[in-house]
Amino acid sequence: MASQGENSVKKAIAAYFQGVAAAYPIVLGYLPVALAFGMAAEEAGLSSLGATFTSVTVFAGASQFALLGLLEGGTQIAVTVLICLALNVRHIVYGPSLSARLTPTRQKMLPFVAFGLTDEVFSLSMSRIAHIPRTRQLFWLLGLESAAYLTWVGFTWAGSVGGKLILAALPFLETTFSFSIPALFLALLMVMMDRESLVPVLAACLASGIFLWLQLKNLSIIAAAITGPTTWLLLRRNP
Amino acid sequence: MTAESFIAICAIALGTYLLRYLPLRASTRNLHAASNGAANLNRGFEIAGICVIAALFLHSVSLPGDSAPAFAAVRLIASLAAVAAASRAFRNPGVGVLAGILCFALFPLLL
C-alpha cells in the first residue's frame, strides 16, 4: 500500500514538472511583456514593489496595462476597477470550456488551479490537456501555471528594477517591447480562432474599429464582446 | 504606490480571481448535468472571449515611432505576419510572440 502511495506521489510530481516543461512557449511570450509591464509601471509612478505586487496578485496582463493607463490618467478608482474587471470578464468562459476536457479528481486543487487560468494558460492547456492521464491533469496544469506565474512575477520585478539599465545598453529594445503586446494578442487569436468564429470575430473587429475611430476605446472592447456572439447566434439561426 | 492604487489593485485581483474560480467550480460540479443549452452558452462565451482578444489586439497595435511611416508599416505588417504564421504552424502563442519579436527586432538590420 505504501509503495502504491509513493508511486502515485512520484507520478504527480512527474506530471507537475511535465507541466513546467510544457510552459516554455508561455515563458517566451511572457518574458518581454512582463519586462515591459515592469518598466511601464515604474514610469507610471508605481514603485518596484507596487509593480511586483500587481503581478503577484492580479496575474492578468491586459488589465494590468489598462490599470497603469487609468491610474496615470487620474480615473476614479471605482471606474478603474470596473474597467479592468470588464477586460477580464472573458475569463468566465475559460473554466467552463476547460472543464469539458478536464476530469477534476481533486476538488481541493481547483482554487489554486483557477488562480493561474490566464489567456495563454487556457489556450495551451485546451490543446494539450486531453493527452494527460486523468488523475494527473490538475498537477500538470499546476506545473504549467507555476512556470507562467513565476516568469510573469520575476520579469515584472526585473523590468521595474533594471529595465532602464537594459534600455540604456540596448535602446532598440524599447520599440521591440512595444510590439510584444499586440503580438501576444494576435498569437492568441491565431491559436483560438476556428472556422465557426471567423465571421463573428470579423464583425467584432468592425464594431470595435468603429468605436476606436470615434475615440471610444473602452467601449470598443464591450462592443466586440456583444457584436461577436450576436453575429454567431444570427449565423446559427440563418446558416 | 498610493493607498487608492493599493485598494484598486486588491479589488481587481479579487475580482479577477473570482471570475476565474467561480465558473470553473460551477462547471466541474455540473459537468455531468450539462445540457445542449449549456453547451451552446459555453460556446457563446468562448466566442465572446475570442472577440474580446481581437478587440484588444486592435486596441494595442500601432506603428513604431522610431522610423519613417512607410518603413514602420512594412515592418509592422511583416512582424504581424510572422506572429500569425508561427502561431498557426505551432498552435502555440509563445512561439508566435517570439517569432514576431525576432522579426520586429531584426527587420531594420536586414534592410
Image (tube, coloured by chain):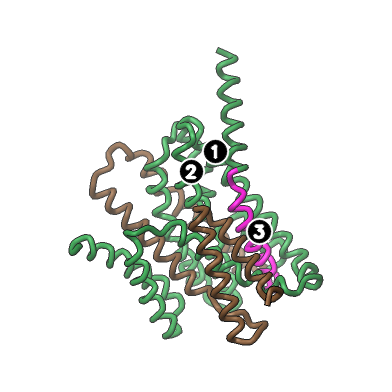
Task: Locate the N terminus of chain B by quadrant.
Answer: bottom right
Locate residue A216, reporting x and y percent: 43, 81
The type of residue carrying mark 2 is Arg
Q: Which mark is residue A31?
A: 3
Assess whether mark 1 and mark 2 are in contact (beta carbons under 8 angstroms). Answer: no
Colour of chain A in the rendered structure image: green
Circle 1 Cα neighbour tier, 10 Å, few/some/many (<14 / 14–19 / ≥20):
many
Q: Is residue B100 above or below residue A57?
A: below
Q: On the image, numbered disc 2 is attached to which residue?
A: A128
Locate residue A94, reporting x and y percent: 42, 51
Viewed as shown, does residue A31 lie left or right of A86?
right
A38 within the magenta span: yes
Q: Is residue A40 visible?
A: no
Colour of chain B in the rendered structure image: brown
Q: On the image, numbered disc 1 is attached to which residue?
A: A140
**For the magenta stretch, what is the residue range?**
A22-45
Q: Residue under mark 3: which chain is it in?
A: A
Task: Locate the C terminus of chain B by quadrant.
Answer: bottom right
